[in-house]
């Protein structure tokens, strides 16, 4: 059996890796237009929080995100040095609101150290902040984690081909199973108009004194969200969330908004050293698609496809749980194939 994974972002490489790890004798190939370090996943700060997931059922988001959160903590516990080198770390921080009584998020039972902020806690921030909560989150930095997974996948015998396809039909005669992690490309590959970009612009700065993350829910403009996210080598300041915006170039307007909004909450960011401005197109969908589909494309010939795309701003929050579901569906295909040979 020959398997092809289309897409080389975090969900593509994680799906390919989980399959190859479980079935080492199978031929598994990734075909992707972009490879690390040039994927959207490489730009991401990797902060764990379900974000921009559309209308996806909350029980699915809860299960997928818990799987990733637990995976990160297990990695830190069992292989602390390697985990750090792979961009995995924990940070405590706060989620602030200008509303008087922020609601507990549906995922609050997943995380460690979750607590509501009291009045003394809130005194650290501008008077506009009225409520908030804190917890220990994990960071899985795409720029470090993806190269590690790529390396492990290739060392296990997996193949990566840098190629842009125009139709899945190009692959039907060569592969038995296709794992579709093609993200925004599904707009033309599947004519899936429920898929759309959410443009994210961020700034990377040097500010080693920033040790806690800070998220602020205060903007009346749905195109903006304020966050300060410390990675191992820099701090990520953000950001934008423009739907259906395909512009991959930073704009001066967005950069100025990010600088002003983050300094309002963390004034000493004024002394941060600018590194670069980055833009990525988050591959969103009205709801995340993780499901199996069997496609008839010739007489007595079916291609088996597993879809795993549309994760919005949560690729590095959901990837391990989604890859597990892909593996379960793929194992079902293997079992069906074995039964048919009896």
Image (spheres, rainbow, N blue to C red):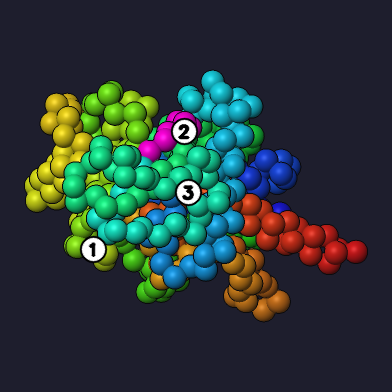
- Start and end of the magenta stretch? 87-93
Q: Residue furthest front?
A: 119
Are there few (<14), some (14-19), or many (20+) residues within 10 Å of tag 1? few
* Secondary structure of residue under mark 3: helix
The front one of 103 and 260 is: 103
Please check the rendered image and state whether residue 50 is part of the magenta-colored stretch, yes or no: no
The answer to whether residue 329 is seen in the rendering is yes
Residue 273 rendering spot, x and y as whole percentages: 17, 26
Residue on which the image places disc 1: 222
Q: Residue at x 33, y 40 (%)?
A: 121
Q: Residue furthest top?
A: 81
The front one of 267 and 223 is: 267
Seen in the image, is 129 located left or right of residue 169? left
Quarter of the image for the C terminus: give it.
bottom right
The front one of 15 and 339 is: 15
Residue 313 rendering spot, x and y as whole percentages: 38, 54
Residue on which the image places disc 3: 317
Sooner in the amino-acid sequence: mark 3 or mark 1: 1
Say which of marks 3 and 1 sits in front: 1
Q: Residue at x 12, y 44 (%)?
A: 260
Residue on which the image places disc 2: 90
Gap in angstroms between the C-alphas marked 1 and 2: 28 Å
Sooner in the amino-acid sequence: mark 1 or mark 2: 2
Gap in angstroms between the C-alphas marked 3 and 1: 21 Å
Residue 82's place in the image compared with 105, above or below, is above
* Secondary structure of residue under mark 2: strand
Say which of marks 3 and 2 sits in front: 2
Residue 258 rendering spot, x and y as whole percentages: 17, 45
Q: Residue at x 33, y 25 (%)?
A: 233
């Amino acid at each position: 059996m020959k398997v092809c994974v289309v897409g080389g972002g975090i969900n593509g490489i994680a799906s390919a890796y989980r399959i190859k790890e479980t079935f080492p004798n199978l031929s598994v190939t990734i075909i992707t237009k972009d490879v690390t370090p040039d994927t959207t996943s490489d730009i991401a700060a990797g902060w764990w929080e379900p974000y921009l997931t559309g209308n996806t059922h909350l029980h699915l988001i809860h299960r997928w995100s818990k799987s990733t959160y637990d995976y990160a903590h297990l990695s830190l516990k069992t292989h602390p040095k390697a985990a750090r080198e792979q961009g995995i770390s924990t940070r405590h921080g706060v989620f602030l609101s200008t509303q008087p009584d922020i609601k507990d998020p549906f995922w609050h039972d997943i995380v460690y150290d979750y607590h509501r902020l009291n009045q003394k806690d809130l005194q650290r921030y501008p008077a506009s902040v009225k409520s908030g909560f804190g917890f220990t989150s994990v960071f899985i930095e795409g720029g470090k984690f993806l190269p590690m997974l790529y390396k492990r996948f290739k060392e296990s015998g997996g193949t990566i081909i840098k190629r842009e396809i125009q139709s899945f039909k190009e692959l039907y005669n060569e592969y038995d199973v296709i794992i579709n992690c093609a993200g925004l490309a599904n707009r033309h590959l599947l004519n899936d108009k429920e898929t759309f970009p959410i443009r994210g612009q961020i700034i990377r700065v040097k500010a080693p004194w920033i040790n806690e993350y800070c998220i602020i829910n205060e903007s009346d403009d749905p195109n903006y969200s304020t966050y300060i996210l410390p990675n191992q080598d820099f701090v990520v300041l953000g950001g934008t969330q423009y739907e259906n915006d395909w512009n991959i170039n930073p704009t001066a307007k967005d950069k100025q908004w990010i600088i002003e909004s983050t300094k309002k909450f963390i004034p000493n960011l004024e002394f941060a050293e600018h590194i670069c401005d980055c833009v990525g197109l988050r591959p969103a969908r009205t709801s995340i698609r993780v499901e199996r589909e069997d496609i008839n494309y010739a007489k007595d010939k079916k291609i088996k496809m597993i879809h795993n795309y549309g994760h919005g701003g949560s690729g590095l929050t959901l990837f391990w749980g989604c890859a597990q579901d892909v593996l379960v569906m793929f194992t079902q295909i293997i079992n069906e194939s074995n039964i048919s040979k009896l």
